[in-house]
Every structure is written in structure tokens, then in C-alpha cells.
Image (cartoon, rainbow, N blue to C red):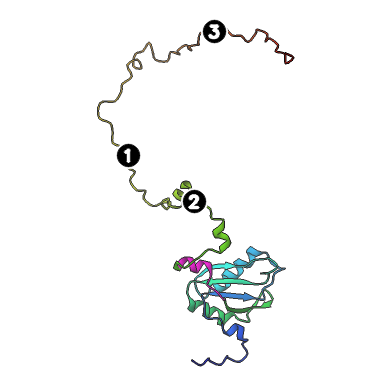
Amino acid sequence: MASRPLPPGLPAKVASVPPNQTLYVTNLPSAKINKEDLRTALYMLFSSYGAVLDVVALKTMKMRGQAHIVFKDMQTATQAMRSLDGFEFLGRPMKISYAKSKSNIIAKLDGSFKPPAAATAAQVEITDLQQSIFNAPVPGAPAPAAKLPPKPSGADHVMTDAGTPENRGVKRPREEPEEEESDEDVAMEEESDDE
């Protein structure tokens, strides 16, 4: 199988990356804008081309000036890349290419997500309380009918003295325990260790 010649002007590294739902954006301003504002501005710009699932823009030294934009499908990612590559964003021309690997959010959606090796070593156990919160019904949705235990057979237990007028509203005296002789006031004998 013969390899295709590379289009002129593209480095071999960029041309060898296959199309992906995730775009890798570089040459972003990093000092002028905070991270949340940058993510919001990128989302607003890229969402005009299609559904954006996630925007990852970090301010670490290694990732400064870079972002990953995750689209719902590959066609909209390609359209956005072709239209916005070289677009001046906050005073700098963006450089856009396909990401080298699939985004974690896409891997989770299609069921092929594998946590990194470091995350598997520190696996956190999900408690029953957390599981019940995650499995709780959506607010506003009709609640499923709760299954109550069956009512016990027989009549209800009626309090006999509650209905009489002489017992109503009368405070009962406290039952105090009988006092026992205590040795609290008696001085303790000193023990000596000299024996």
C-alpha cells in the first residue's frame, strides 16, 4: 500500500494525525485572560459550528496557551477546524489541528474509557450513600410508589388513661431512685509502696 503524498505546507507530524472529534488549539493568549473566561469565550466561538461537549483549557506551564475542544461529532469538528484555523482570537491567530488521541469524555460515552494507571492504584470505593445519590430520581419526575410494609392485623392500641379528664394535662412526678449509702465523703486510706 503506497502512502499518499502530504499536502504542501503541512508538517508530517500534523498530517499524520487522523480526524478526531477533539480539536487541539494553540497560540491562545494566556496572560491576558483567566481560565474560566477563556473557556467560556472558546465555547461561545466553537459552539456556533455544532454541539461542544467539553472545553479543556489549563493554565499550567506545560499547557499554557493551548486548549482542547471536544465536539459531539467529527463533521462539526472538521468544519470548525477549517473555518477557524488562523482566526484571530483575542489578538492572536489560532492554530487548530486534530487532537492526537480521543478525549476522555468521548471514550466514556462510547464505553472505551480506561482510567490511567495511576488512577487505578488509588481506586476509591463508592459508598452506598453516594450510590443512592447517583441513582436518585430526577427532580420533578414522578416518584415511584413507595412500598410500605403491610399494616399489622388487629385493632390499633388505644391508650386507656388519655381520654379521662382527670389525667389530661397533669404532670407526672419524677420517679427518683432510692438513695444508697455512698462512700464519696469517706476519706480513702493511703496505700504505701514501702512494704
In the rendered image, residue 13, in percent from the top left (x then y), is placed at: 61, 83
Identify the residue under disc 2.
126
Instruction: Note whether 148 is above or below 163 in the view shown.
Output: below
- Which residue is found at the position 38% from the left and 12% from the top? 167
- The numbered mark at residue 180 is 3
- Sequence-first disc among 2 and 3: 2
Q: Are marks 2 and 3 in contact (CB under 8 Å)?
A: no
Queried whether the magenta region covers residue 27, the answer comes back as: no
- Sequence-first disc among 1 and 3: 1
- Which residue is found at the position 48% from the left and 65% from the top? 108
In the rendered structure, which amino acid carries the disc numbered 3? Glu
Identify the residue under disc 1.
148
- Which residue is found at the position 43% from the left and 13% from the top? 170
Quadrant in which residue 54 is drawn = bottom right
Residues drawn in magenta: 100-109
Residue at the far front: name it.
Answer: 195
Instruction: Note whether 163 is above or below 122 in the view shown.
Output: above
Q: Secondary structure at mark 3?
A: loop
In the rendered structure, which amino acid carries the disc numbered 1? Leu
Q: CA distance from mark 2 to mark 3?
A: 53 Å
Q: Secondary structure at mark 1?
A: loop
